[in-house]
Amino acid sequence: MKGSYFHNVDLVQRLARAARALGACVSVEYPVARGQRPRSVDIFLLWEIFRIVIEVGCSIARIGGEIPKAQNLKADLLLLVLPTPRLAAAARRKLRRLGNQKQTATAMQIRVLTLGLALDALRRPEILRQWANPRSTPDRPQASRTPFVSPVRQPNRKEPSNEDSLG
């Protein structure tokens, strides 16, 4: 495996174990393309109907190169996992800058997470389903942008009763 001990054992292997516990088909160092020096993603998951790519980084130097690799694999969700909140915030800023320059339109969702949040997401399948498929599904209607407003009883309005309807 490529990378340091911290990258491989502390980050990648912990995420792979959590994904296996989720019931996903997990591939570590999954090749994206063929060649003398093939590019690969750290973790590639096939889970339910979703293709999820997890890229683990210890710096933000190669954040821009992770998106084309996930697009080549036709991923529904790209999780960029970094060890600290400070690196995660820097990665989000870099992705915003790259998005403004490249204007890449893709249906793939991208999430930047710390290790703890990524492990938590892999333990809660409803989060992954929502992230991987923000569109509506048969068992979950698409969420609207306006919050749900519960009906409130008007204090001055008379409630209909059975006596009024009978006659």
Image: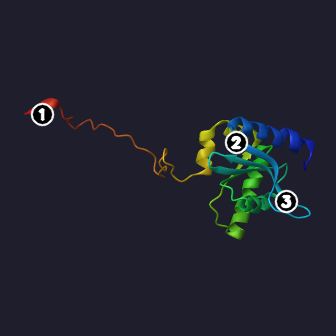
**Which of the two marks, 3 or 2, is nearer to us in this view?**
2
**Relative to 44, residue 99 above or below:** below
Q: Position of residue 146 (x, y in %)?
A: 46, 50
Q: Secondary structure at mark 3?
A: loop
Q: Earlier in the sequence, mark 1 or mark 3?
A: 3
Q: Residues within 10 Å of mark 1 (few under 14, many from 20)?
A: few
Q: Which residue occupies 80% across, 61% down?
A: 65
Q: Which residue occupies 83% across, 58% down?
A: 62
**Which of the two marks, 2 or 1, is nearer to us in this view?**
2
**Which of the two marks, 1 or 3, is nearer to us in this view?**
3
Residue 24's tag is: 2
Q: Are marks 2 and 1 in contact (CB under 8 Å)?
A: no
Q: Position of residue 79 (x, y in %)?
A: 72, 50
Q: Which residue occupies 34% across, 40% down?
A: 151
Q: Residues within 10 Å of mark 2 (few under 14, many from 20)?
A: many
State the CA–CA distance, disc 3 to disc 2.
22 Å
State the CA–CA distance, disc 1 to disc 3.
75 Å
Residue 164's tag is: 1
Say left or right for 142 vs 50. Answer: left
Say left or right for 30 vs 167. Answer: right
Residue 27's tag is: none
Q: What kind of residue is marked 1?
A: Asp
Tally of numbered tags: 3
Residue sitting farthest toward the top: 163
Q: Position of residue 152 (x, y in %)?
A: 33, 38
Q: Which residue occupies 79% across, 43% down?
A: 84
Residue 39's tag is: 3
Q: Secondary structure at mark 2?
A: loop
Q: Secondary structure at mark 1?
A: helix
Q: Position of residue 28 (x, y in %)?
A: 81, 47
